[in-house]
Amino acid sequence: MTLLWLAIGLLLIPAAWLLLLPLRRARGTHAAQQAFESNDGLEAENVRVYQSRLASLERGHARGDMDDAALAEGRVELERSLLEDAEAARRAPLKAAVSGRLLVPLLVVSMAVGSLYWYQLEGASGDLALTAAIEATPIHDAASFKARIARLRAEADAQPDNAKVWMALFPLYRDAGQLNEAMQALDVLIRLEGRVPALLAQMAQLKFFAAQRTLTNEVQALVDEVLAVDPRQPTVLGLLGIDAFDHSRYEQAIDYWRKAIAGMENPGAAKALREGISAARARMAQAGEVDASVALSESALGDANDSDTVDDSAKTVDAAQLTLTVTLAPALKASLAGNPGATLFIVARDSAGKLPPLAVVRTTADQLPLTVTLSDDNAMAPMARLSMADEVNLVARISASGAPAAQAGDLEGRLSDVTVTRGDTAAETPLALHIDHVVGAAATTP
């Protein structure tokens, strides 16, 4: 932002110089004009012409060419002409060289103030502030990710009508698992930009995952609205593919995903959907809907047609999964006495902290102790799945408020650097994830 004001100042300097230049030259111009007027012989020339014509009339009268009346009339005409010429040649008196010297600085100041005011109304200072906020909060771990969210939230409060701020903010909320906040930010963006199909598709996707990958009536209404305007909208097609996959409609899922890939600009998301297509074909082979060798050959052919062949189309058969048993420390059970139905989140994140949540299960605390299996079926988005990580951090959190982000007073348990198992390497004994401490307090002895 400082560079912007410096640039504006540098542009105003030559503009002010151009306005002040006439004031600097005023004295010399005044002297030259005064000298010109002093040496001007136009009036004397007019008198000479008058006298010459009058003498000519008198000679004609003396020769008898005209009578007294004609001479008098000619003399009156010459005098009238002389007066008209004198009036036409008359100039207004020159003003002093310093006359109006205060007007130029006033114009300079008015120009500067007017330019700044116009820029505040029509310029992009808000976009520059947004860029500065993003550059000031590089993301390299979970803490810096939260710092970016906080900084952009402050920018959204400072310039609530700037759609670009909300466009940058809502994906951060989404990737952090804060779906309610993401939907609120997206609501504001839709209000500012209108019901654009791409934004409505994002809203449908958020509501779909918030409803535990359920195609609710609200989600279906958004999907129908988007497809009525843009039948090839990739986000909606990807969502429909996930729903079809979850309900074992694998051929339909493949059809949706292939159409989605055709309209996708994000290579990572397109690759994730290609892997999903391979997984769907593998499931079809396992169910006997197609021969396994045919499924794998079709998978390879389909990937080749999409110009991004998967290295090993059979690898998705051995799906990544983690089975864990979640328990609550006896010392913390009293904390749930007044709210046994508090929301329980079970979340898997990549150990490096570079991806959104890879798997999320949402249930209630009264289900504890609970054994659950995390897999790609629990992904929040196709581009962030459990199979993409080798090691993950597991978190079980009981939230009285129902918010996915940790808050003081929540009950929590963690497992760090857990190796993701695949297929035959899956552990026979579930992992033990023990909710043993209160967020903001020391751990409780199990």
Image (tube, grey):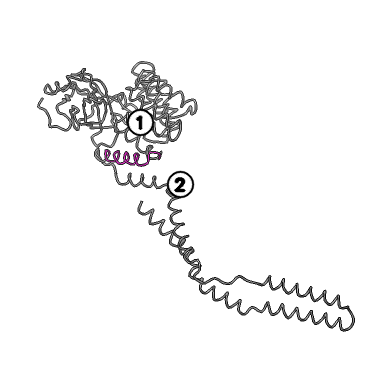
User: Crowding at label 2, few (<14), some or many (≥20) Cα neighbours within 10 Å?
Assistant: few
- What's the amino acid at mark 2? Glu
Query: In the image, is 341 to the left or to the right of 314?
Result: left
List x then y, in percent, for residue 275.
35, 28
List x then y, in percent, for residue 348.
25, 29
Q: Are marks 1 and 2 in contact (CB under 8 Å)?
A: no
Residue of label 2: 122
Find out whether residue 153 is within the magenta segment.
yes
- Looking at the image, which residue sits at the far left? 445
- What's the amino acid at mark 1? Gln
Magenta-drawn stretch, dominant element (helix, strand or loop):
helix
Q: Nearer the viewer, residue 40 or 443?
A: 40
Q: What residue sits 75% from the left and 72% below the top?
A: 80
Whether residue 270 is visible here, answered yes or no, is: no
Query: In the image, is 232 to the left or to the right of 77?
Result: left
Vertical placement of residue 61 versus 161, above or below = below
The residues tagged by marks 1 and 2 sit, at their Cα atoms, a distance apart of 27 Å
Q: What residue sits 20% from the left and 28% below the top?
A: 410
Q: What is the quadrant of the C terminus in the image?
A: top left
Residue 145 falls in image quadrant: top left
Find out whether residue 36 is within the magenta segment.
no
- Secondary structure beneath disc 2? helix
Q: What residue sits 34% from the left and 47% below the top?
A: 132
Residue of label 1: 184
Query: In the image, is 167 to the left or to the right of 368?
Result: right
Query: In the image, is 377 to the left or to the right of 80?
Result: left
Which stretch did the figure color magenta? Answer: 145-161
